[in-house]
Image: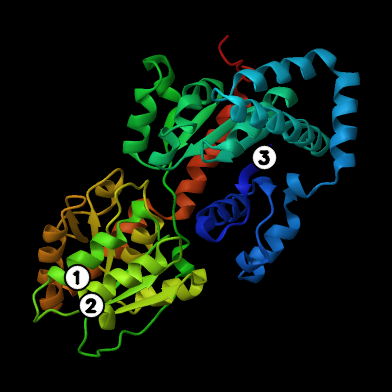
Amino acid sequence: MRIAYLTSQYPATSHTFIRREISAMRQLGCQIDTFSVRAPAHAELRTDEDVREAQATYTLLARPWRDYLLAHVQELVRQPARYLRTLVVAARHRPPGLRGSLLSVAYFGECILLAREMKRRGIGHLHNHFANAGAAVGLLASIHAEIGWSFTIHGISEFDYPAGLLLPEKISAAKFVACVSYFGRAQAARVVGPEMWPRLKVVRCGLELERLPHVASVETGEVRLIVVGRLSAEKGVAGLLEALSLMRSDSAPRLAVVGDGSLRAELARQAEALGISERVDFLGALSEADTLSEIARSDVLVLPSFMEGLPMVLMEALALRVPVVASRVAGIPELVEEGKTGFLFSPSNWQELATTLDRLVVDRALRRRLGDAGPARIAEEFDIRLSAAKLRDLFRQAEESEATPEELPS
């Protein structure tokens, strides 16, 4: 079966796990075509692999208006009933209000072009990552093309408004829903009836373990912490800075902040106000390779988030033998084994985080023991080849199913 992958943007610097998944699926013999709603900025194409994937991806918003006009005229003339049915579903599958109405028109416009292109290529199944606007386009396109559809749920934001409002309908229409964590599956099960639960499958995101860098550790006498992520409120970096200021004076680790975002200047001012700016290095957004190298040469990775799915950066740190300290939220406890590969702390309890970091900073043997346990934990459950094999089987089951894509409830 030929499979289409659709995301709001592909490739994307923050979503390299999608590229890894597609690559692993192709290595298993799956034929996958990539589609994107919008094109990535040139600055996001940091590697030759990114450039190749971008060039091979059919980007909806990059198509000329003539393609849209031709697609809509042809589909209306050839299949008027199906065209109008898709339009009705698009008008219904939206949040309330004028903005929701306007967006539904845009999604309908995109879905007809996408459906036409998928039919031209002989695609039999469409898969989305994230239950967002891209998934709305994918759902509508699958209905119009009369092919199977599925999607992957990643994090808490997909249960927030407006995505969460439409999530039950998306689950009802999907052949299966891949959830990256049991926590995510539980949240999805919360919004639908028990009859829908069997289609909720746990499929981990994973790493290409053989492509991880090998960086020799260098003893400098100074313990180095690292935090990686978007500099926005939900990532909790402001709390990490507070925790750093609460640590014992004999600890005094250095902190590398990898990532960029709207709060960067504010966080720099906070570090200055707390008197720790000389120990905090804001490195900005780095390439995937450079980020992995920075993690590998660190002593502890810290993730102080208020909300998460199942963070790839934690997997990367563990695979690189770097112990982690993370907030006890969402799917993180499914990955980080307390006292074995790292430590968990109560989200927003910065004194608890400071105490935990104090313990790790002064105990090199503890850091080494936790780090040494990391690679085995990742290999047993978070190898991308395991995830790809499970997805391949789910796509095969969807192909074998005689059921047509389900209509959204009236």
Q: In this view, does 96 lie above or below 288?
A: above
**Residue 244, numbered circle:** 1
Mark closer to the observer (1, 3): 1
Residue 336 position (above or below residue 69): below
Q: Distance between the residues labelled 3 and 2?
A: 51 Å
Three-letter amino acid code at the position of disc 1: Leu
Helix, strand or loop at mark 3? strand
Residue lying at 23% horizontally and 77% vertically, measured from the top left:
276
Labels 2 and 1: the sequence-earlier one: 1
Residue 92 sits in which quadrant? top right
Q: Which residue carries the number 2 mark?
A: 276
Q: In x, y percent, where is residue 78? A: 89, 20
Image disc number at residue 3: 3
Residue type at numbered disc 3: Ile
Snapshot quadrant of residue 133: top right
Expressed as whole percent of the image width and height from the top left, the position of residue 266 reads 36, 66
**Would you say the residues marked 2 and 1 are in contact, meaning their CB atoms lie under 8 Å apart?**
yes
- Disc 3: CA contacts within 10 A as few (<14), some (14-19) or many (>=20): many
Image point (62%, 56%), residue name = 11
Q: Which label lies toward us, 3 or 2?
A: 2
For residue 136, above or below residue 211: above
